[in-house]
Image (spheres, rainbow, N blue to C red):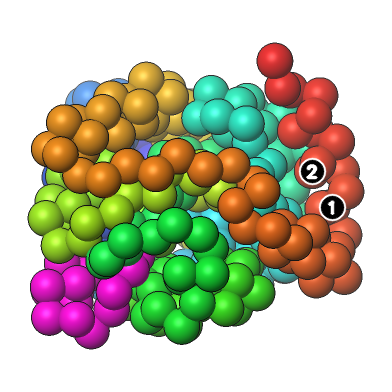
C-alpha cells in the first residue's frame, strides 16, 4: 500500500493524448494495476487530452506537487533539461525497433537520474510514439516544396529547429485542433506519427504522406519529486515496477503496430512518398551542429544508437 503518502488514496496522472491513444490506455492500465496491487485502497485517475493543461503546465504542477504523475513527451523535459534534446537527433534511429532499443540503453537510463535535481521530477522509464512522418497538402517532390508551408509541430525547440532549418513555417498546435486546421487551411502540413495519421484520419485532409522516419518521439513516465519524497521505499518500488512495465509495453506495441498503421493509411489510396536522410540535404547535420552546443550527450547518444543498431 502507498502508506508513505498521507491520505493519498487517489493519485492523479495527466497527459496530452486523447482517450483512444496508446499512452492514455497504458496510463489507465497502470492505474488498474495499482488498484489491484493495493486491493483497491489506492487508485489513479487519468486526465487525458490536456484536461489539466498543456505539458508545460503539467510539468509545473509536478514540480509543486499539485499533480502526482504524468506521461509527458521527452521534448517537454528537454525544455528543462536540454540534454534530452539529443533523443530528437534526425535519423538517430534506423527504424522503429531500433528506436525502442535506444530508449532501453544504459545512456537513456542514466539520463533519468538527473531529473529530480534539474526538473523536480522522478523519471520512471520511457515510452514512445512512432517515428515521425510528414503529411502535406498538394504534391511534394522535394524538400524545397515544404519551404514556407505552415507545418504543424509540437511546440518544442528540437522540432522547431529542424523545421526552421528546412525553411518551413513551423506552427505549434495542440492535437485536438489539428484536423480542423488542416481542413480549413490554417496549416497545410503536419509532423505526425502513423498512429495519429490513421486513428485521427488526418489522411483525409492532405494528399501526400512523406514516409521519412526522420525523428524519434519518446515519452517519459514521471512522478512529482515532492510526492515521491513522501513515499516509503516499498511504495516507490511498487509504483516503479508497475509503471515501468506499462511503459515497456507501450514501446513494444509501437514496434509492432507502427508499420501496420502506415500500411492502413496506404490502403486508403493516400499518395506515399518514401524518402531517406538525403531528402533533407544538410538539415540533419546543421541540426547536430546546433544541438551539440545545447546537449552535452548528443555525441554519446549517436554512439549508443550506433551500438544498438542491427
The secondary structure type at the circle numbered 2 is helix
Residue pointed to by mark 2 = 301
Above or below: residue 35 compared with residue 294: above
- Most foreground residue, 264 or 173: 264
- Most foreground residue, 306 or 233: 306
The secondary structure type at the circle numbered 1 is loop
Q: On residue 189, which mark appears?
A: none
- Crowdedness of circle 1 by 10 Å Cα count: few (<14), some, many (20+)? many
Residue 256 lies left or right of residue 287; in this view the side is left
Residue pointed to by mark 1 = 297
Indicate the quadrant where residue 282 lies.
bottom right
Give the quarter of the figure containing the N terminus: top left
Residue 258 lies left or right of residue 166; in this view the side is left
Residue at image coords 23%, 84%: 186
Q: What percent of the width, then of the height, locates residue 92?
A: 68, 42
Above or below: residue 58 compared with residue 244: below
Residue at image coords 66%, 48%: 278
Q: What percent of the width, then of the height, locates residue 281?
A: 69, 58
Magenta residue span: 176-190
Q: Is residue 288 visible?
A: yes
Give the Cα separation between the discs numbered 2 and 1. 6 Å
Q: Is 219 part of what is drawn in magenta?
A: no
Q: What percent of the width, then of the height, locates residue 284?
A: 71, 57
Residue at image coords 45%, 49%: 132
Q: What percent of the width, then of the height, locates residue 90?
A: 65, 52
Q: Is 182 part of what is drawn in magenta?
A: yes
- Most foreground residue, 226 or 255: 255
Residue at image coords 70%, 63%: 283
Amino acid at each position: 500500500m502507498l502508506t508513505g503518502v498521507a491520505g493519498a488514496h487517489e493519485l492523479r496522472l495527466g497527459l496530452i493524448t486523447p482517450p483512444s491513444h496508446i499512452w492514455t490506455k497504458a496510463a489507465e492500465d497502470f492505474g488498474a494495476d495499482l488498484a489491484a496491487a493495493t486491493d483497491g485502497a489506492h487508485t489513479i485517475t487519468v486526465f487525458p487530452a490536456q484536461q489539466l493543461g498543456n505539458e508545460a503546465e503539467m510539468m509545473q504542477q509536478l514540480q509543486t506537487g499539485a499533480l502526482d504523475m504524468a506521461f509527458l513527451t521527452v521534448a517537454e523535459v528537454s525544455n528543462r533539461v536540454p540534454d534530452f534534446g539529443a533523443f530528437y537527433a534526425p535519423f538517430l534511429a534506423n527504424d522503429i525497433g531500433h528506436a525502442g532499443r535506444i530508449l532501453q540503453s544504459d545512456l537513456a537510463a542514466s539520463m533519468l537520474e538527473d531529473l529530480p535535481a534539474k526538473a523536480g521530477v522522478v523519471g520512471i522509464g520511457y515510452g514512445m510514439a512512432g517515428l515521425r512522418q510528414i503529411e502535406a497538402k498538394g504534391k511534394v517532390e522535394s524538400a524545397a516544396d515544404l519551404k514556407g508551408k505552415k507545418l504543424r509541430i509540437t511546440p518544442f525547440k528540437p522540432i522547431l529547429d529542424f523545421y526552421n532549418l528546412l525553411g518551413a513555417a513551423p506552427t505549434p498546435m495542440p492535437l485536438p485542433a489539428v484536423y480542423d486546421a488542416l481542413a480549413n487551411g490554417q496549416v497545410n502540413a503536419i509532423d505526425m506519427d502513423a498512429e495519429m495519421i490513421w486513428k485521427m484520419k488526418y489522411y483525409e485532409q492532405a494528399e501526400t504522406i512523406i514516409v521519412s522516419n526522420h525523428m524519434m518521439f519518446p515519452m517519459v513516465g514521471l512522478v512529482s519529486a515532492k510526492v515521491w519524497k513522501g513515499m516509503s521505499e516499498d511504495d516507490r518500488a511498487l509504483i516503479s515496477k508497475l509503471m515501468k512495465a506499462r511503459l515497456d509495453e507501450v514501446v513494444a506495441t509501437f514496434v509492432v503496430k507502427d508499420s501496420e498503421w502506415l500500411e492502413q493509411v496506404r490502403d486508403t489510396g493516400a499518395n506515399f512518398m518514401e524518402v531517406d536522410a538525403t531528402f533533407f540535404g544538410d538539415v540533419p547535420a546543421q541540426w547536430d551542429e546546433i544541438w551539440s552546443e545545447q546537449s552535452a550527450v548528443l555525441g554519446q547518444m549517436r554512439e549508443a544508437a550506433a551500438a544498438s543498431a542491427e
